[in-house]
Amino acid sequence: MKQKQLPSRSVRIKLFSRMSFYARSNDVFWLLFFGLLLLFMLLWGAAIGSYQLSILKSWQIIIAPELAPEKLVRVVWEFRLPRLLVAALCGAALAIAGVILQSITRNALASPGLIGVEAGASATMLVFVVIVPGVIPVFLLPVFAMIGGFIVASCVWLLSSLRGYSPIRLVLVGVGITSMLSAFSEMLITYGDIDLVESALMWLGGSLHQASWPQVKVMMFWLLIAGSLAWLCFRQLNLLILGNKVAFSRGVDNRKAVPFLLLLCVALTSASVATAGTLTFVGLIAPHIARRFCANRHGALIPLSAVIGACLVVLGDSLGRSVFAPLQLPAGLVLVLIGAPYFIVLISRLRKA
Amino acid sequence: MLNKVEAHSMSGFPVARLSGVLLLLLAVAIAAFLHLSLGAKSIDWVTIWQALFEYNPLDMDQVIIRESRQARLIVSVVVGASLALAGVIMQAISSNPLADPGLLGINSGAAFFVVASLLFFPMFGQDYLPVFAFLGAAFAALLVILLSGWEQGSERLVLAGVVVTALFSAMTAILLLIDQQGLEKLRHWLTGAIGASDLKKLQWVYPYLIFAIVCCFTLVRSLNAFHLGERVAASLGVNVLLLKVSGLALVVVLSGCVVTVAGPIGFVGLVVPHVARLLVRNSYAWLFLYSLLIGTLLLILSDIAARIVLRPYEINTGIITAFVGAPVFIALVLRRMK
């Protein structure tokens, strides 16, 4: 690329010796800013809880665990850190999924839950928790939830592309399937044994209280693979939001690109739903917040919304743990509570503009 | 097709439509009898007849019918009729084939307000529950409008409804997590349950309901004009804003009443108007009447299904209507949307 074609204020970033790309300094700044914010939130999240620490103290414990008292190290490293990291990773995954879905449906109100992943995973989970408890071991539950999410999402895709795919159909068929599945889930919630239902409900509300280091690793794996693939598709996404015809004329075939992107979206969503329950409101708002800083340039939008999504879930989880302590509110519910009013204001403003 | 031709040729006296109404009434009557006879214990038709007209309080079967099934039947009839009317009005004023009080979050808004009022303001009597439900329904409707705007397409309206539903059901879930006993008490109601005890609740809401149903029929002329398009309606002398606002108010009252009585029951308002429009197309007076009857029929049938599918257990009626309604919704999307 020649120098004069570049946007005015841009910096050259060298990833490896042979791979380099250009980024606007603006985007780099916001990315760093929200990255630091995320770091701060993680520290704050590690500090608060039933055993209160100062932020400085939590920093010391994380940096140099061998110097701190063993009890505190245990609290931070075994309970709080995995939980926070799972929260951050799930938030990032859902935010990326949200960006993808909003771009391929060209709809500001689309969220990753719409294509049925969330409802499918929840229904599968409820079946195995409430109807046939103990059939599969607890640690395999997320895997089954993930498979359920995949199956339902592919049903939605097949149905909506039965007579030719269109974004509206995808979204609305998703709404239909989701509401049918949630009726099924509600049936189980209503008639199941109240104790089993109680634990299932905690999970459904997006609760992170069982987070552990293996979960962090699994989630990291999915986020790295699917997230980076999604990021590499940023050019396709940039073109797809302009419409299928424009995209096609610039060499992006939406019949191939859309299923692939949806697959990424489903993978990201179902991985995080399986780990942390239904948090998908993040996927709705994080892209919108990110768009205020970098518009629709997906090269910057994807990483920025990932970081913002991570911030949001960490914030939601920390608030859910601390505001009503000793009662723990699921992060997903807290997020809806914070996010929905903001979102409504945002959308009504967008509409006027 | 036959309907239309005959209605035109015999100007003034719509035989075909009246006979359609009579057929539907007959169907409703048969369904009602089935509703009374089927259940955890099947009761023969003679006993039902006796229970209704020569009541003998010593016969246990007759007591079952009088005390529990009859109440349930009445509630289903009222709920079905009001939801169907709400659906017709919503689809008319939003010019949107996919509008439904359940899908657009109005029911969940009403449900949240009812739960909140039960938990936070127990000192208000239960007479105030419908008022809270109206407030919640109105609030949810305003949020949906704010999110989507009047003139937006179906997809945007439905998605706005999904967001609002998510908001309100999350808030309800939080309330119920804070108050565990509330969950135990309310979880049946929250998925749209019809039960015998609901007849009592009907007494709180019937003044509003009767008023709303009568009002629906006064909107007929303006709705007929509005069907031709907003501008045409305005040029025919219809106050479009007033029509929309009063239509919305009626939807709020109707679905608020239903939520107070039976909890959020979805998809009836979506499915019924479409079925009714297969039978009548061009007049809202007939459309209202047909929808009323079809809604009643649908809800009685769903309630029968709710009671006999898992005999002797009962499923919530709202779940049955979702299972019936969601496929219809998907079929509508696949046929109508491009």
Image: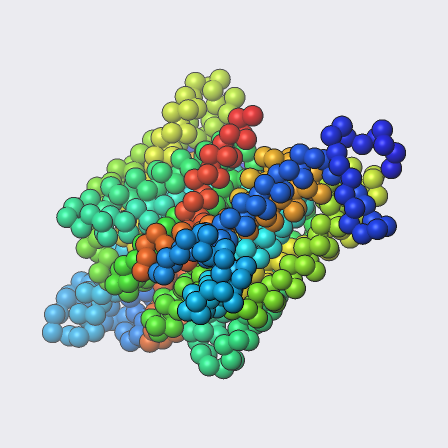
Residue A68 seen in the current view: yes
At 64% from the left and 55% from the top, the residue drawn is A265
* Front one among A82 and A257: A82
* Front one among A7 and A286: A7
Q: Residue furthest right?
A: A2
At 49% from the left and 65% from the top, the residue drawn is A67
The quadrant of the picture occupied by the N terminus of chain A is top right
- In the rendered view, how is the structure colored? rainbow
* Front one among B246 and B74: B246
Position of residue B216 measured from the top left corner of the image (x, y, whole percent)? 34, 36
Q: Quadrant of residue A86?
A: bottom right
The quadrant of the picture occupied by the C terminus of chain A is top right
Q: Residue furthest front?
A: A67
Relative to residue B83, is residue A193 depicted above or below? below
- Please state if A37 lies on the left or on the right of B248 as rendered: right
Position of residue A18 measured from the top left corner of the image (x, y, whole percent)? 86, 50
Residue A263 seen in the current view: no
Relative to residue A335, is residue B246 depicted above or below? above
Relative to residue A32, is residue B169 depicted above or below? below
- Please state if A196 lies on the left or on the right of A89 as rendered: left
